[in-house]
Amino acid sequence: MRKGTQAIWAVLATTLWVAPVHSQNGEAPSQGATEQRELIYCADQMTHEEREAYRTRMRAARTQEEKAALRQSHRQEMQLRARQHGLDATQCEPLRLRVRGGRAQ
């Protein structure tokens, strides 16, 4: 019985060691993928499809200036949406920035 247990653990360890790591969407990470996933401004006010469309546009942007312009445009759109729904625009800020008078923890 001991040899059977050792064999199972060896197979399990080999499987875990050899298994590739995949991202959430099932794609293998690219070489040098060190870019962190950014928080989307007012993401909780968006649908899943809107968040994915935003991420797609950000990936398609070639320069940092294009990305900054997309972020600014998105921020203005979300603030307008918040006002139309009677929400305070500060509710789009991440919770950690709203807590304790805007001081990040």
Image (cartoon, rainbow, N blue to C red):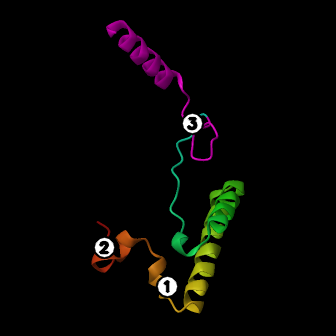
Q: Position of residue 37 (x, y in %)?
A: 53, 53
Q: N-terminal of the two: label 1 or label 2?
A: 1
Neighbours of disc 1 within 10 Å: few (<14), some (14-19), many (20+)? some
Q: Which residue is mark 2?
A: 103
Q: Name the residue type under label 1.
A: Ala
Query: Rounded to the nearest whole Å, what is the CA distance between mark 3 and mark 2?
Result: 33 Å
Q: Position of residue 44 (x, y in %)?
A: 52, 72
Q: Which residue is mark 3?
A: 32
Neighbours of disc 2 within 10 Å: few (<14), some (14-19), many (20+)? few
Instruction: Give the label on residue 89, or none.
Output: 1
Segment tinted magenta in the rendering: 1-30
In this view, 29 is above or below 41: above
Instruction: State whether residue 65 appears in this view.
Output: no
Neighbours of disc 3 within 10 Å: few (<14), some (14-19), many (20+)? few
Q: Name the residue type under label 3.
A: Gly
- Is 98 included in the stretch rendered in magenta? no
Q: Nearer the viewer, residue 88 or 16?
A: 16
In this view, 13 is above or below 78: above
Q: Position of residue 64 (x, y in %)?
A: 62, 58
Q: N-terminal of the two: label 3 or label 2?
A: 3
